[in-house]
Image: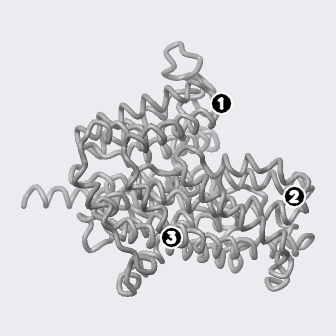
Amino acid sequence: MLLSGFLTIFTLKTLALIAAGTVLGIIFGAIPGITVTMGVALFLPITFGMDPLQGICLLIALYIGGTSGGLISAILLKIPGTPASIATTFDGYPMAMRGEAGKALGAGIVFSFLGGMFSVVALMLLAPTLASVALEFGPYEYFGLALFSLTLIAGMSGKSMLKGGISAIVGMVFAFVGMAPITGFPRFTFGFDELVDGFSLLPALIGLFAVSQILEEAMGNKREEDAAAFSFNIRGFGFTWREFKGQLSNFLISSLIGTGIGILPGLGGGICNLVAYGTVQKYSKYPEKFGSGILDGVVASETSNNASTGGAMVPLLTLGIPGDNTTAMILAGFMIHGITPGPLLFDKHSDMVYGVFAALIVSNIIMILAEFWGMRLFVHILSVPKNILLPTVGVMCVIGAYGANNRIFDIWTMFLFGVLGFILKRFAIPLGPIILGFILCPILEINFRRGLQKSDGSLLPFFTEPISCAFIIITILVCLRLAWQEWTKKKA
């Protein structure tokens, strides 16, 4: 059936659409503010007149290319092109500033490809089984998962747990602004109608990581760092076979995390790259080096976010439930052509299913080739004079923030978070926990409320449901371990 799927897509037009979609996706992903979801949404109307399989292949290629493309601006500019590349900035940019931009890009590209291929294999072999596990996740389980994910703040806090905690609380405070879930009661709007919908993630992300970086670059003098960054040499993918073998355990852990979180509807690459980064750091032999510019951080982030792509296709194809925002657009693409994903899809449209599997594999191959050939051009972004680069990036940020919801208010949101990020950096407060708190807080709150509704106000099911209970117990154990580590550190 897989061979049949390859034969279905091996036509000149279909392969050209996959290649064009992948390259355009890389460009969309690399431009700060132009998300993968936005790129797929822009091309959705174009698929109306296409053959169903060709239209879906184009959307999938945009998805694969866009998810990987975010690493380019994350490493070279310290600005994540997409939410899925937030953690890539933590170690990718310091490597670029040391003159290792080629190594960081090469590792990111290779492990993006491997993570994507891992998730495609998982999709083909385990789709029905994994989808049935995802079905077991209700409000109690999602609450436990979100609660456990908050413990990863410790890994992003650097040397000060207090500063990491403050950062996460700031993110949660901003997440509470807007309509309360379930009840729809407006909170912390202060009479401004624009705040009823709350702060959008994309403008907040652009502000924290892009505008704050622009302000920092504009106010600083980094000529010496720039000179070091420009003296790069790239052979092959920029890293050795020994370094590759040293990352295999990291790759496996991050792939499992990315695929697993991708399967859970509503989470996606924006969370899994942070979770994988925190997990790999927690179990590393040298956790103190994370954030200073090591391959482990780049590999964890880029492996997991690309592994989430195949994972997010599992609930889409087997249950008709989109795994994230982008697969929601792909679901719309299916329905435009009169095809309803779900359990019957494998019986009624098996040629379509295996054509999708083949398109995922081909798109990942085109992605690694396109980024490998373009890698030597990407690193020259570092040599562009700041007086040209910063205004250009600034304009793209404004366009990206406005394009999210077509609201001027989102541009002001971007500037607000940009100034906030700039101030927090001055006090050495990490920005990663803000985003983690901002993303996880709504998931935590809405599932807590749903759980209480389901149990008529009783907290007991949160502790009696097996999966939820397991997550809560693990969370408690992790917190106790962190407290013990802090106490022994103080004693020492």
Q: Is residue 168 above or below residue 252?
A: above
Where is residue 122 drawn, in percent x and y?
A: 64, 76
Q: Amino acid at mark 3?
A: Ile
Dot 2 or dot 1, earlier in sequence: 2
- In the displayed structure, does residue 427 sit left or right of residue 258? left
Dot 3 or dot 2, earlier in sequence: 3
Q: For residue 109, which numbered disc appears in the image?
A: 3
Q: Amino acid at mark 1?
A: Asn
Residue farthest along the top direction in this orientation: 191
Dot 3 or dot 1, earlier in sequence: 3
Marks 3, 2: nearer the viewer: 3
**Which quadrant holds the N terminus?**
bottom right
Where is residue 222 drawn, in percent x and y?
A: 25, 48
Where is residue 87 drawn, in percent x and y?
A: 42, 57
Q: For residue 340, which numbered disc appears in the image?
A: 2
Label 3 vs label 1: CA separation?
A: 32 Å
Residue visible at 23% across and 64% down?
288
Residue that label 1 marks: 406
Q: Is residue 295 above or below residue 24?
A: below
Residue visible at 64% across and 43% down?
454
Q: Is residue 359 above or below residue 293?
A: below
Label 2 vs label 1: CA separation?
A: 30 Å
Q: Amino acid at mark 2?
A: Thr
Relative to the observer, which residue lies in front, 375 or 162? 375
Looking at the rendered structure, the secondary structure element under dot 2 is loop
**Which quadrant holds the C terminus?**
bottom left
Q: Is residue 201 above or below residue 185?
A: below
Where is residue 450 drawn, in percent x and y?
A: 61, 41
